[in-house]
Amino acid sequence: MAASNGRSKRQRGEVETLPSGSLRVKVYAGVDPISGKRHYLTEVIPAGRTAAKEAEKARTRLLAQVDERRNPRTRATLDQLLDRWLEVADIEATTRMGYVNKLNKHVRPVLGKLPVGRLDAETLESFYASLRRCRDWCGGKAYVKHRVEGEHTCTAKCRPHVCKPLSASSVRQIHWILSGALSRAVRWRWIAVNPAGQAEPPAPPHPDPQPPNPADAARIINEAWRDPDWGALVWLAMTTGARRGELCALRWQHLDLAAGVLTLRRSAYLDEHGDLQEKDTKTHQQRRVALDPETIEVLRELHGRYVERLAQLDADTDRVDYVFSPEPDNSRGYRPDTITQRYGRLAARLGITSHIHALRHYSATELINAGVDVRTVAGRLGHGGGGTTTLRVYAAWLSESDQRAAGTLAARMPARPTSPALPSSPYRTIAEELREQIQSGRLKPGEPLPTVAELAQAYGLSVGTAHRAVALLTAEGLVNVARGCRATVAVSPTSNRRTS
């Protein structure tokens, strides 16, 4: 091609013929930021009559990608991107360890060698689906899972592999880790678009907190109190909803027993070397939690035992000493995993399926059941978002609390004026006669009602009609109904003077 000054214009990109007869299109795309070498976009066109024309189209397309900066600037692999991202990402130590563990165990062995530019939504979604089938990426092949690498004599621990799917929650965490790294790659112009933004992770799991019921909570406290110091820790976990790391980092200077206030400022964690460290709380904010008189007394007794031990050791008390400690002088806090394991053994002895975080759920659900507003509960638990997390996790308990609130308001309402007499429906006839028996005392509180089958037979009506009658009395608060049990009278006839 000739320029206006008569000189030939240098053509960008080149097309070379391979020994097979195919054409290879090659376009310069800058310097690779990882290797420092010249980076080219290439595409091979099969040999044929139209090969030259297709090669020219490919050259034009690749040049457009370079001009519009839509091409990957590097041949770097996902492993290289993750290494670079972890170097610059501002992540808490515990969060970083979680990221590294997930990446090393699940991502790097499968996708690590793949060039970042070749990673797309289809590849990611296929990867997620495979993890949901088997966390070990077995591909459906049978093999023996050895406990020891290299040559060895197999024992009973060497057994056939059994597929265990990775939870939807863990797969979603992997998705967001990759999304963060790939988003940084877009900012660095390593790639043009974030493929994780186009991929769809598994749906979020439905929150399912499983706090111990009041009876189990009492058994847990009684068993923990075999060691009063350990019992005090379990008690405080129940009454304040503090996280295990916050309890491990709690010091005497954070307690104001005169004012009845506990301040949660720090949280304990284990670093990558297994050493005990401290950091900010999960939301990076301190919070003040009010203590009830019984909890204040528990902590006073705990402090008294601490003072007595130091007197025996001929040592002085120090406000920076830990509240809960495995050491006689309280100079060192508990490791969070120690708390988890000890509580797990306690629950196993009692035959209760529970974990230490369930005590936090217990505190939240009991507060909600007592009618405490969501913002106050969120503040005590240290939930961010002004109660959004609390609403999402404890929606079921909030619903039950709202139903009780409606019943409480209904009980305080004045008697409803009697409507003009209307032809009574069959189910209302049954309800009126049962209501009269309850109000007159012929059916006493706690006494079972006739079954719906008996009512249907007595009145010559269908079982469904009898059900409606019992449901009406239940809505009025006169009858209690539980699944698998007969309906019983709920209140005394003098405590409810409503008429139908």
Image: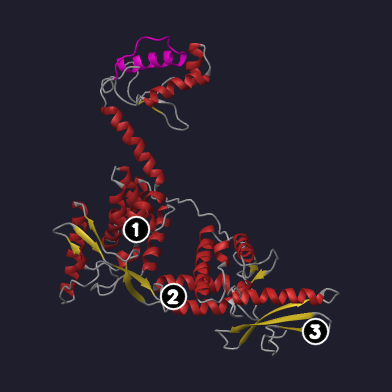
Mark 2, Cα crowd under 10 Å, few <14 / some 14-19 / many 20+, is few
- Residue 421 highlighted magenta (yes or no): yes
Mark 2 or mark 1, which has the lower sequence index?
A: 2
The residue stretch that appears in magenta? 416-440
Q: Quadrant of the N terminus?
A: bottom right
**Which numbered marker is on residue 384?**
1
Q: Position of residue 375 (x, y in %)?
A: 30, 50
Mark 2 or mark 3, which has the lower sequence index?
A: 3
Q: Position of residue 122 (x, y in %)?
A: 64, 63
Q: Amino acid at mark 2?
A: Ala
Furthest residue toward front: 5
Q: Amino acid at mark 1?
A: Gly
Secondary element at image label 1: loop
Secondary element at image label 2: loop
Question: Compared with residue 145, is residue 429 higher up or lower down, i.e. above or below?
Answer: above
Residue 438 shows in this picture:
yes
Mark 1 or mark 3, which has the lower sequence index?
A: 3
**Which numbered marker is on residue 17?**
3
**Residue beneath disc 2:** 89
Q: Quadrant of residue 449?
A: top left
Residue sitting nearer the eye, 73 or 334: 73
Which of the two discs, 1 and 3, sits closer to the camera?
3
Q: Position of residue 342 (x, y in %)?
A: 38, 63
Residue sitting nearer the eye, 175 or 340: 175
Q: What separation in Å lies between label 2 and label 3 (alpha carbons)? A: 45 Å
Q: Position of residue 425 (x, y in %)?
A: 45, 13
